[in-house]
Image (spheres, coloured by chain):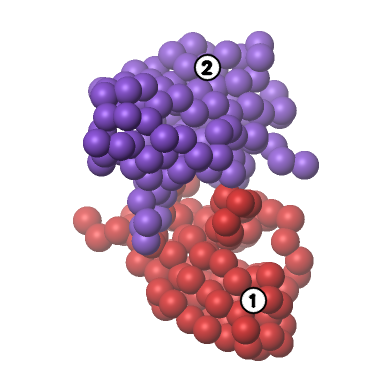
Amino acid sequence: KAGVTQTPRYLIKTRGQQVTLSCSPISGHRSVSWYQQTPGQGLQFLFEYFSETQRNKGNFPGRFSGRQFSNSRSEMNVSTLELGDSALYLCASSAGTPDTGELFFGEGSRLTVL
Amino acid sequence: QQQVKQSPQSLIVQKGGISIINCAYENTAFDYFPWYQQFPGKGPALLIAIRPDVSEKKEGRFTISFNKSAKQFSLHIMDSQPGDSATYFCAASGNNFNKFYFGSGTKLNVKP
């Protein structure tokens, strides 16, 4: 069974630009979550999508948004990039039911904002 | 406010020794406590998890000890091996939501 696939793996942007990251979950998984990982901060929850609906949201500004498609693939978008947005963005999929269970993480998209 | 506090930030253990990582939480609604292991360049992977109805769970060399009254849980790695060198994250979730709060991570270095 293929794992969680994230693209692109690395990208460099400049302040003010926007970026879109993509995540393909494990086949059959309906829940996709996004986390931001930075040194010293650990992993911070961005949002979770289940069956194309945002089910949970973290404490990030509105510049961070996401969506999920009917095939469970998900994208997250960050607009008006700031230097502090430089991080590893991790996508995780899970079966989604029951609601709390194992998260399967991708290898992440490393974003550098200059 | 950090929902899950993890210590130590880094840990050096000799091969064959015991590695102990501690976590504390505030929210009594949390009912699922996993530990994740992350190697450089990889995403975190579930190592072991526990629910508050038991005080201990063991899987091979890895054991979670859970103290509900103290709102603390810890990971013990017995007979630590160089291959265990990685960053470990504790996490917590509750209220049947797929929203996890992670600790800040512990970088473990097992010396041969």
Q: Which chain is purple?
A: B
Q: Chain of mark 1?
A: A
Q: Which residue is mark 1?
A: A78
In the foreground, A69 or B110: B110
Rendered view: A101 above or below A108: above
Q: Residue at the location (57% across, 51% down)?
A: A43
Q: Residue A71: in sight, yes or no?
A: no
Residue A13's x, y, as percent?
58, 86
Amino acid at the residue labelled 2: Phe
Rendered view: A109 above or below B50: below
Residue B46's x, y, as percent?
38, 40
User: How far, Cα to Cα, is label 2 from label 1?
Assistant: 38 Å
Which of discs 2 and 1 lies nearer the camera? The answer is 2
Q: Are marks 2 and 1 on the same chain?
A: no
In the rendered image, which quarter is residue B30 located in?
top right
| The C terminus of chain A: image quadrant | bottom right
Amino acid at the residue labelled 1: Val
In the foreground, B68 or A83: A83
Is residue B62 shown left or right of residue B54? left
| Mark 1 burial class by Cα count in 10 Å: few <14, some 14-19, many 20+ | some
State how many labels appear. 2
Q: Residue at the location (48% across, 81% down)?
A: A11
Q: Which chain is red?
A: A
Residue B7's x, y, as percent?
58, 32
| Mark 2 burial class by Cα count in 10 Å: few <14, some 14-19, many 20+ | many
- Where disc 1 sits, the SS reads strand
- Where disc 2 sits, the SS reads strand
* Label drawn at residue A87: none
Rendered view: B19 above or below A61: above
* Label drawn at residue B66: 2
In the rendered image, which quarter is residue A46 located in?
bottom right
Residue B9's x, y, as percent?
55, 40
